[in-house]
Image (tube, rainbow, N blue to C red):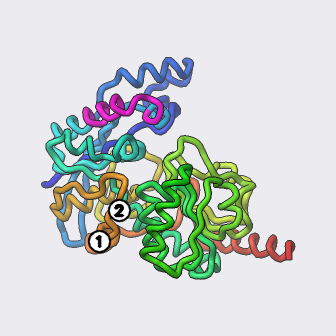
Amino acid sequence: MNKFAFIIHPLELDDVARKFSWASKVPDYIVEKFVRTLPAIKASHITGIRSKTGKEVEGYFVVCPLTSEQMLKLPADKVIKKIIKAGKKAEKLGAQIIGLGAFTSVVGDKGITVAKALDVPVTTGNSYTVATAIEGTKLAARKMGHDIKKARVTVVGATGSIGRAVSLILGEDIKHLSLVARDEKKLSALQEEVLEVNPELDVSYSTDVSEAVRESQIVISASGAVKALIDADDLQPGTVVCDVARPRDVAERVGRERDDVLVIEGGIVEVPGPVNFNFNFGYPPKTSYACMAETMILTLEERFENYSLGPVLELKKVKESLKLAKKHGFKLAGLRSFERPLSEKQIALIRENAEEKMSAVF
């Protein structure tokens, strides 16, 4: 049976405490030092992935023991060495392709150096992540009564690999697009690239997240920041936000205080077959992140090649990943918000609350 591996890491120190209970009782700096000394760890054996074609594959979760903050603050070469060691562990387990999860796909050149150092191909899973984020956003927009062609759409983290691909592909279906990132030169270059593909599109850019988001009806956020960028005061009633980032770009306060906006988690899919991850990463049985799913799909296809790597995703691969997902029975796992499923009734209530607040303003 063909095998894959997916490299994960603790997003924050609380995740370390779930594995090592003593970590919640000592100062953070001690936990941080401890984490850095750990070797790569096999977290679980993944079984039961069965395509609707009948083909089955298996895999492993391998932990690269660094938190999100450590991955961004430590020297990139040291972090990449840690990721490569996790990749070597995956190779020893028999993986024929390796997926990079969360910040392991962001550090340095987004997987290129890691792939060169390993004997098996690597993917970040970002192609299928983009495809599902767009699919989920369109679904959520329809449910909230938005005409996506007329709405102002903002992409936060637009100059990243996910944000760029979202901007270019979604730009085919909308009229108003706002690009948000920290680097104005990169934003200007992306604006030109988007206009080359979609010359009729109204495209603006900004380095101010709050200002851009306040003017938008639809937001897709994939910044790669360590802390939340979008807060409760930043959103107008009825806004749809697709948060692709891990850690989240949308503050949890939004979920508690704003009953008139729809925040969905991007890139959550249902995996075909009696899958057992043997690992709890916060989602119901049979569901995973799209980046994980891309690694599974490529294994089912026996496409043992470097697929989604580097800062520039191939748009044809984004579209291909969606076709391959459907072929094997992977699909969007409904809509979820802050790790909880959203019912039709809940979405209808959010829409009703938004309409009430909007009517009060006008």
In this orientation, which residue lies closer to the viewer: 129 or 275?
A: 129
The C terminus sits in image quarter: bottom right
Please name the residue that numbered disc 1 is placed on: 320
Q: Residue at x 43, y 46 (%)?
A: 281
> Marks 2 and 1, how far apart in space?
9 Å
**What is the magenta range?**
71-86
- What kind of residue is marked 2? Ser
The N terminus sits in image quarter: bottom left
Please tell me the numbered disc located at residue 116: none
Quarter where residue 347 is shown = bottom right
Please name the residue that numbered disc 2 is placed on: 127
Q: Are marks 2 and 1 in contact (CB under 8 Å)?
A: yes
Q: Is residue 247 above or below residue 89?
A: below
- What kind of residue is marked 1? Glu
Q: Residues within 10 Å of mark 2 (few under 14, many from 20)?
A: many
Quarter where residue 269 is shown = bottom left
